[in-house]
Image (cartoon, grey):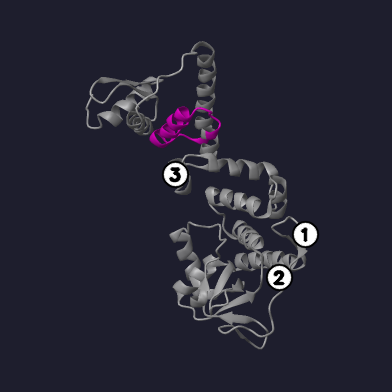
Amino acid sequence: MAKHQGLGKGLGALMQEADLSEEISENGVQLKENASPVNLNLPTGISSDENGTLWVDPALLKPNPRQPRTYFDDEKLAELTESVRNEGILSPVIIEDANDGTFFIIAGERRTRAAKAAGLKKIPVQLRKYSEQRKLEVALIENIQRTDLNALEEAQAYYDLMELGNLTQDQVAERVGKNRSTVANCLRLLKLPEDIQKALVTDSISSGHARAILSLENDSDKRILFGKIIGQGLSVRQSENIAKEMKSGISSVAKTDLKPEPKKDPNLAALEQKLIERLGTKVQLKGGFSKGTISINYFSSEDLDRIFNLIVPDANL
């Protein structure tokens, strides 16, 4: 319980600060924005008790259109639901009137989901008004304070903040209380191929693994390292060491091999890429679909044994 109360106070301080803060318009001009609680002429669906606390049926709440979180961990949400069922909502959900009988959740979507799952008919809320940029800022900061976003969600939120407010990385870092290098490294994750991004979201690889992959310039080498990480269960340090070895190998090849590779059939290239991902090593297909050779690289006896077991899993040697 103490944990929720502490977080609630921290978020409350954030919201109080937001009430007095200046917002940036689309033209980059500093403008005062009224982010104060709306206490007069309460919209239909909002009720107030004797203490001035506002209450609403969670069924009337819609997700924040600027919500950076796209993935909700079922196990953690179930834990929160049990807590809400026993203790209720300890920190009000921040909402905005959608002017159609419903309300947008600005901060508190996990609490709202948990309240619905717990069967609550009324939850405490704060009714506010924010610019599109501030909606994203508040949701991002709240998620960082309460339960970490996955790395891709955080990166996309930083990018959206930069686009919405024409902000620099330094300005974004200052607004969310992070170091610039943290924001910069996070943004780099958006350069990963879609399937590697998916592996990051599902925790098949970590942010450290992703950074090791991004340290490689060659797309094929990125795929090879990704395959090794998945296939061999490499640690971050092992991945970084392999990336260093691959980069040193690339630089020596670059000095001696000046011949451009012949253009390959895109379907054959796609098949080659799938083999790279499956085997976690460099694979080359030479020839065509009717005739050719497959070249598979290995870098140690353990690597050879691993590749062999992938190709012939039931062999008894």
- Is 222 a magenta residue? yes
Q: Where's residue 71, x and y in %?
A: 48, 56
10 Å crowding of disc 3: few (<14), some (14-19), many (20+): some
Q: Can you tell which mark lies on residue 30?
A: 1
The residue that mark 2 highlights is: 35
Q: Tell me: residue 158, above or below residue 72.
A: above
Q: What stretch is highlighted in magenta?
A: 214-236
**Mark 1, secondary structure of its residue:** strand
Q: Give the spatial CA distance, label 3 vs label 2.
A: 38 Å
> Is the stretch drawn in magenta largely helix, strand or loop?
helix
Q: Quadrant of the C terminus?
A: top left
Residue 287 or residue 179, whichever sits in front: 287
- Residue farthest to the front, as pictured: 27
Q: Check disc 3 and give the amino acid type.
A: Ala
Q: Where's residue 181, x and y in %?
A: 67, 41
Q: Check disc 2 and give the amino acid type.
A: Ala
Of pointers 3 and 2, the one earlier in the residue sequence = 2
Q: Of the residues tagged 3 and 2, which is closer to the observer?
A: 2
Q: Of the residues tagged 3 and 1, which is closer to the observer?
A: 1
**Mark 2, secondary structure of its residue:** loop
The residue that mark 3 highlights is: 199
Q: For this view, does 36 lie left or right of residue 109?
A: right
Q: Give the spatial CA distance, label 3 vs label 1.
A: 40 Å
- Is 133 a magenta residue? no
Q: Give the spatial CA distance, label 2 vs label 1.
A: 15 Å
10 Å crowding of disc 2: few (<14), some (14-19), many (20+): many
